[in-house]
Amino acid sequence: MTSYTPTAEDFLPLDTALEGDRIDRPSLSYWQDVWRRLRSNRRALASLYIVVGLLLFTLAGPLVWSVDPALQDLEQVSQPPSLGRTALVVADTRPAPSLTHTTISSAAASRDRTPNNLRLLGTPHSEGVSLAWDPLPGVEAYQLYRHEYPPRDADDLGLPLVVLMPHEVSYRDLLRLETRQYYYSVVGVYDGEEARAYTTLPVQVEQAILFSEARYRGLLEADATPESVVGSSIRLESHPLGTDYLGRDMLARLMWGARTSLFIGICAPLIFVSIGLAYGGLAGYSGGRLDDAMMRFADFVIALPFLLFMILFKIAFGLGPGESGVGPMLLALVLLSWPATARLVRGQVLQIREEAYIAAARMMGASAPYLVLRHILPNVMGVLLVSLTFAIPTAIFTEAFLSFIGMGVVPPTPSWGSMCNDGIRTMLSHPHELLFPALFISSTVLAFNLLGDGLRDAMDARMRSGT
């Protein structure tokens, strides 16, 4: 047997440059691994960016786009999206035309006689359209109509504007004119009946604004006078997403409406998920009869009808028709939505409390608060976070639905649901009033749902074995 005497070289550290001794994969914590897996899911990552963008749109948007969402501009009612339109400045007082003539009498006047020379007096604009025509012999009165489309026959002349006496052969239309083409028709009345013959004039109306209104809105220089600006064109305020039926800026209302919708959609889930966490955690950790009794009560709450209690809470709050029901809505969501989270947390706690490391901690003398805060709660947080991301879009959709049917947020307070309710009335003529709030609701709900799917996959321990 030979003896060996160790030397100093035997105790030198190993060469870390060797490929076989280097650790290629760094050690990651649980949440670092979740973030790594979430970033590899493109749909979930894009949804996360959308959610962050919505929060910036809600919180920072009104600071950038400082337009009053309640400001009504009746000169730009239901306007499509634009980056600024030009308007003709007109004088505040513009006398209506008063063309008259001596009544032409004719015993042989024909009811089929067509009014001649229907013409414009001046420039047609949104502040007034002045018309005139030649007199008809033997006529008893004139009936003037306005249509948004070319009339097909004498029974399709549109909106009756006015009935004029035989000596009146001019009129100025001031009835809510929009920047579009109208078709004016004039008909003679004989023996109390309208003739079948008519004359139609197409008129293209341009945008106009009164001098006083332009000065009030700060669109003119401080030293501007009517003589210097009347007849010229100025640029109006821009509305990137258009205006609604009262001339209010859609972008500003969407920003402020997002605060209402997301406040309800995020605050309510945070509250009832926290209640469900405490309730379900207590039931699962206690077990036995207490667990059975608590779960039977949760089953009873699940069976309660949400809409009925929403109505009862509105009555209890003393709110009548047309009053905002944000308080009753939050109360109904919190009191009736926590059992789903409680049942989910209870199932997780029942599984975790039987794990070996929990038994080992008990044998080492760990107290119940220590077990809950150090072991059980961190292992439940993943499932709880996924549950929260699915509860938020449900609450947002619930708010939109209740506001749409008039039981949630009501005007003038903006919310995406109430804006959809307003836009449904004009969806055929002005679809942007319904399209934009509906698009925001759909995008938000879809983004939170896809983010919840991504978080569920990233936090599922059974899916990590292959990575």
Image (cartoon, rainbow, N blue to C red):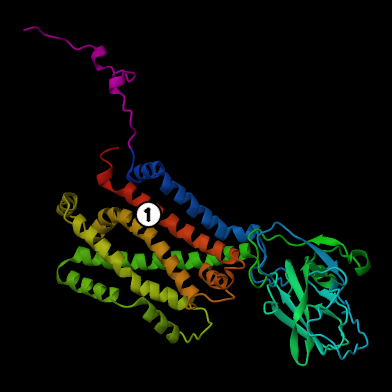
Image position of 122 (left or right of 421): right
Residue at (41%, 48%) from the top-left corner? Answer: 44
Residue 353 versus residue 424: which sits nearer the camera?
424
Q: Is residue 278 visible?
A: no
Q: Quadrant of residue 426?
A: bottom right
Q: For the magenta stretch, what is the residue range? A: 1-27
Q: Quadrant of the C terminus?
A: top left
**Residue 7 sits in quarter:** top left
Q: Is residue 141 magenta?
A: no
Q: Position of residue 75 (x, y in %)?
A: 74, 70
Quarter of the figure with residue 160: bottom right
Residue located farthest toward the bottom when viewing the structure as drawn: 191
Q: Inspect the magenta stretch and tell me whether residue 6 lies in it.
A: yes
Q: Position of residue 459 (x, y in %)?
A: 31, 49
Figure quadrant of the N terminus: top left
Q: Which residue is mark 1?
A: 452
- Name the residue at 74% across, 71% down: 183
Q: Residue 439 location in percent, x, y?
A: 52, 60
Number of numbered discs: 1
